[in-house]
């Protein structure tokens, strides 16, 4: 049984056009589509948590080969479901000139 203060953090991994999500620190990331990711985020019930709660953070790890549109859609989805975005950079995932990097640099 999970204690109230042991909220599990969701981690989203983006590699190229593949979305993988780990529902907690101990689970293996599984491939999902955007609708399945939405269901995972909805199950966290972020809107029921206080606004200042760190349990609302969703970790997003993305390499530089992720298409900008997919990256943008994931960021917006996290926001729509009440999560707070926590970005993690993946080293060695590419040359730094991926679609997301290009759009952000414009």
Image (tube, grey):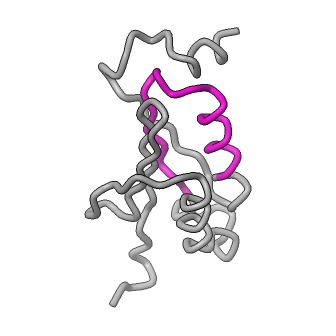
Q: Quadrant of residue 76?
A: top right
Query: Which residue is located at x 31 percent, y 60 percent?
Result: 25
- Please tell me whether residue 35 belongs to the stretch shown in magenta: no
- 9 or 20: nearer the eye? 20
Q: Which residue is farthest bottom?
A: 1
Front residue (pair 63, 7):
63
Residue located at (61% from left, 44% from top): 74
Q: Quadrant of residue 57?
A: bottom right
Question: Which residue is located at x 38 percent, y 85 percent?
Answer: 3
Check residue 75 for magenta coloring: yes
Residue 106 relative to residue 45: left or right: right
Stretch of the chain drawn in magenta: 57-77
Is residue 9 depicted above or below 90 in this figure?
below
Of the 4 image quadrants, the one containing the C terminus is: top right
Instruction: Please determine whether, in this image, residue 105 is positioned above or below residue 19.
Output: above
Residue 48 coordinates in the image, percent (x, y)? 67, 76
Q: How many marks?
A: 0
Q: Position of residue 12 (x, y in %)?
A: 46, 49
Q: Residue at x 58, y 46 (%)?
A: 85
Residue 68 drawn above or below residue 53: above
Quadrant (top left, top right, bottom left, bottom right) of the N terminus: bottom left
| Residue 32: percent from left, percent from top | 47, 55
Percent coordinates x, y for residue 79 in the rendering: 70, 52
């Amino acid at each position: 049984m999970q204690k109230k203060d042991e909220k599990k953090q969701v981690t989203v991994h983006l590699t190229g056009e593949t979305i993988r999500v780990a529902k907690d620190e101990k689970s293996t990331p599984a491939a999902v589509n955007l609708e399945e990711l939405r269901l995972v985020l909805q199950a966290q019930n972020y809107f029921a948590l206080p606004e200042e709660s760190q349990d609302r953070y969703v970790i997003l790890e993305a390499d530089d080969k992720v298409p900008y549109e997919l990256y943008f859609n994931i960021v917006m989805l996290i926001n729509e479901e009440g999560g707070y975005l926590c970005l993690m950079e993946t080293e060695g995932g590419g040359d730094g000139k991926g679609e997301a990097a290009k759009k952000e640099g414009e």
